[in-house]
Image (cartoon, rainbow, N blue to C red):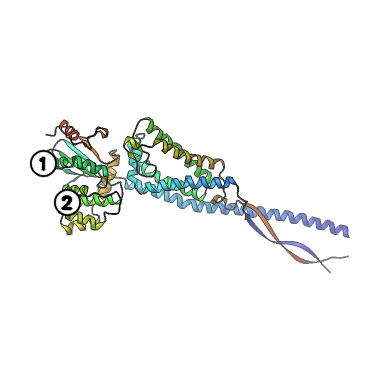
Amino acid sequence: MAKSAQRYTSVVVNFRARTFSGTDVVALLARLILGGALLLAGGLKALHPYQAAAAVRAYEILPVSLANPLGYSLPWVEIGVGIILVLGLFIRIGALLGAAMMVIFMIGVGSAWARGLSIDCGCFGGGGAVDPSKTAYASEIARDALFFTCGAYLLWRPGTRWSMDAMGSGRITTDLYEDELDVEEMEG
Amino acid sequence: MAEESRESRSQARLAAAAERKALAEAAAKKARRSRMLVSLAVIAPILLVVIVGVSISLVKSKVDSNVTAPKIASKADGYGLVFNTSAKPQIDVWEDFQCPACKNFEDANGATIHALATSGKARVVFHSLSFLGAESVILANAGACAADEGMFLQFHDYLYKNQKPENSAYWGLSKVTAAGVAAGLPKQSFTECVKSGKFAKWVENIAADGAKANINQTPTVLINGKEIDRNSGAYIDPSLFNKALADAGVK
């Protein structure tokens, strides 16, 4: 007579997704807003490097020799950070960089405002001096504050759902396929 | 017998549980490693794009001393187009054929500048900036083509009189050529020059030089190196502009 014993012959690992929560939805929105804004801003400026440099010079904060390289480089950095945020890759690093940029932008715009300059922030292309009636410092700062909030939220709750960071980090479960094998019963 | 069997079965269950745990942990470890590899594989090209983008922008923004420039361009003046090399005072006009504010300046003071350039009463230097977009580059190049035909001022004036909204995709090859012909340029050589983008690198040089010279917007007009105060109204008020010129010694 054969007695059955159980042997485990195969293991399948599932990345079973958690059911998502409100935090996940907010984190996704934060990533898309901050990342999307950076991508858009960087993309628009990367096409016009000389204008981007002129926009940075117009703040009259950095000497021309530093403002120009910053103007030429910044759009590409924005694009890079924007991409990783949208993909959700290394979210906390992206969020930190994005939030830090927003702090710098707010300081820049606030400083221009305080010094009575009449410039466009040049955030999404354009930039440089504008007619005093066309300055929009308050709304530019408010917009950057919204983006900053997105970054700060992601630093606190990266919420990896729907992100590349979630690859393989779902709750791991194992399904064990159990085959019944006949084992000879040793009697006696 | 039955007792022994129960014991071995419970041992088998324990062993199975341990095996299951070990397998799950190994699988999780493997998954984490492959996730890190995929992450790095994705981040690498992104970093590459950023680094290449930054590098290209930085390299392109250098003034290249080896470009094809129009005959009247002066290296010492940032490759600007110079009229009346030895006259005084010097008037620098930084402009973009597409910029509406440049048209406003042109409408107010263009005839004065044109007269100074032709009468020899001042050293007039035109710097064709192009940061508004691709059509600005096309027009700046065409302006240089016109300069080499000795007709920069005519073409310049024609472009402002017929300015179109910025980047409206109006200034393609045929429209630029037609504008040149309308301004009196010889069709064939002008067309070739525009088509080949003969002075495209020179246009980049002007842009790079403008960045170094801290010219942040167009138009920017300087008299003897001093920028005319934007809030003075001189850009759009001919009497104020003429007074600024007179103060600088223009008779």
Is B217 drawn above or below residue B52 in the view shown? above
In the image, residue A95 lies at what x, y percent? 50, 43
In the image, residue A82 lies at what x, y percent? 46, 47
Tell me the tag on residue B148.
2
Direction from residue B41 to residue B90 in the image, left or right = left
Q: Check the residue under mark 2 and report the chain it is in.
A: B
Most extreme residue toward the bottom is A1
Q: Secondary structure at mark 2?
A: helix
User: What is the quadrant of the C terminus of chain A in the image?
Assistant: bottom right
Q: Quadrant of residue A130?
A: top left
Direction from residue B88 to residue A69 in the image, left or right = right
Identify residue type, mark 2: Asp
**Mark 1 = which residue?**
B119
Residue drawn at (28%, 49%), measured in percent from left and top? B165
Residue drawn at (17%, 51%), measured in percent from left and top? B148
- The earlier-in-sequence mark between 1 and 2 is 1
In the image, residue B43 lies at what x, y percent? 49, 50
Tell me the tag on residue A14.
none
Is B183 drawn above or below residue B226 in the view shown? below
Q: Quadrant of residue A1?
A: bottom right
Residue drawn at (51%, 46%), measured in percent from left and top? A31
Direction from residue B217 to residue A137 in the image, left or right = right
Q: Residues within 10 Å of mark 1 (few under 14, many from 20)?
A: few
Q: Quadrant of residue B196?
A: bottom left
Identify residue type, mark 1: Ser
Tell me if label 1 and label 2 are in contact, CB under 8 Å. Answer: no
Q: Residues within 10 Å of mark 2 (few under 14, many from 20)?
A: some
- Mark 1, mark 2: which one is toward the viewer? 1
Check chain identity for marks 1 and 2: say if they share one: yes
